[in-house]
Amino acid sequence: MRIGLSGGGATVDRVVAQAEDAERDGFSTLWYSSGAGGDPLVLVALAGRATASIELGTAVLPTYPCHPLLLANRAVSVAGAMGRPGLTLGIGPSHAPVIEGMYGYRYDRPGQHTEEYTRILVAALTGERVDVDGSLVSAHGQVPRPEAPIPVLVSALAPRLLRVAGELATGTVTWMANVRAVESHVAPRIRAAAGTSAPRIVVGLPVAVHDDVAEAREEASRQYGFYGALPNYRRILDVGGAAGPADAVLVGNEDAVTAQIRALFDAGATDVWAAPFGVGDARASRARTRALLSALARS
């Protein structure tokens, strides 16, 4: 099974150690959030030099604050610093409170913005010159050709961006899409857009191996409940029939969580991005969760 973890660390040494441990324990990928280390691409460069094969991806970099040619140039530089293949760019439009409230950009047409942005970014990463005048995003220039391909995944939950992810990118990376949402909404839409190619579908969800399911969901509500207030996540939770994030998380004992992860793959996921969270004795809980995930990743 292709199972990845959330990446990060408070110090350079912890970032590197986490990547080395994850590679040794059989995980396919580490996914770095937009806020990881202040700039997740810095962490990717550090982790990439210390490892040999584990994929390192962003999940996700917001599109609005960084022009696609600039992001392509940064990505090529990071791939060069890694000295090996394995960088994957996950991008997305983020959310109105971030883009408008923090950065001051307009967020009135995120679907069109992301489509134009993705078209430019994917073209730029081939190393060819890009000359595009879009309604919202334009680009005229060229960046160095990466030594190895750098795949692009689009954070796609709504129909338009699932089409963009299938038509223009390598696939999608999701968050808060449960098995019902993946099977009925994400997988069929992106596959239809991709045509004969096989799109990648990375499904990100919090995970806790814990015997008391009610306690685990209560803790999940405390840690992740705010996602339910963001419209983009609220819509995908509704598609999945989940009242809130606590209903979307993967919780239960080892057998139950294994069955839930297998169900995601059966529904169309090509990868599961597991975000372990602690319940009760947090350290022991996370260790138990990681042990199961590592065993599944090796299977």
Image (spheres, rainbow, N blue to C red):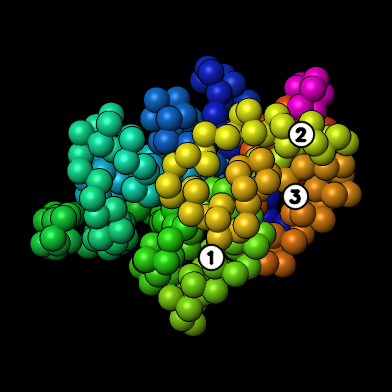
Earlier residue among tags 1 and 3? 1
| Magenta extent | 279-285
Mark 3 or 2: the one toward you: 2
Residue 32 appears in view: no
Q: Is residue 274 magenta?
A: no
In the displayed structure image, the side of residue 6 where residue 282 appears, left or right:
right
Q: Quickly name the residue at label 1.
A: 186
Task: Tell me, for residue 216, which label it has, or none.
Answer: 2
Where is residue 151? Give x, y as percent: 43, 57
Q: Toward the viewer: 187 or 214?
A: 214
Where is residue 248? Give x, y as percent: 65, 48
In the displayed structure image, the side of residue 47 where residue 223 appears, left or right:
right
Mark 1 or 2: the one toward you: 2
Q: Secondary structure at mark 2?
A: helix
Q: Alpha carbon of mark 1 to alpha carbon of mark 2: how far? A: 26 Å
Q: Amino acid at mark 3?
A: Ala
Q: Quickly name the residue at label 3.
A: 297
Q: Quadrant of the C terminus?
A: bottom right
Q: Quadrant of residue 168?
A: bottom left
* Mark 2 residue crowding within 10 angstroms, few (<14) / some (14–19) / many (20+): many
Above or below, 2 relative to 9: below
Where is residue 174? Give x, y as percent: 52, 52
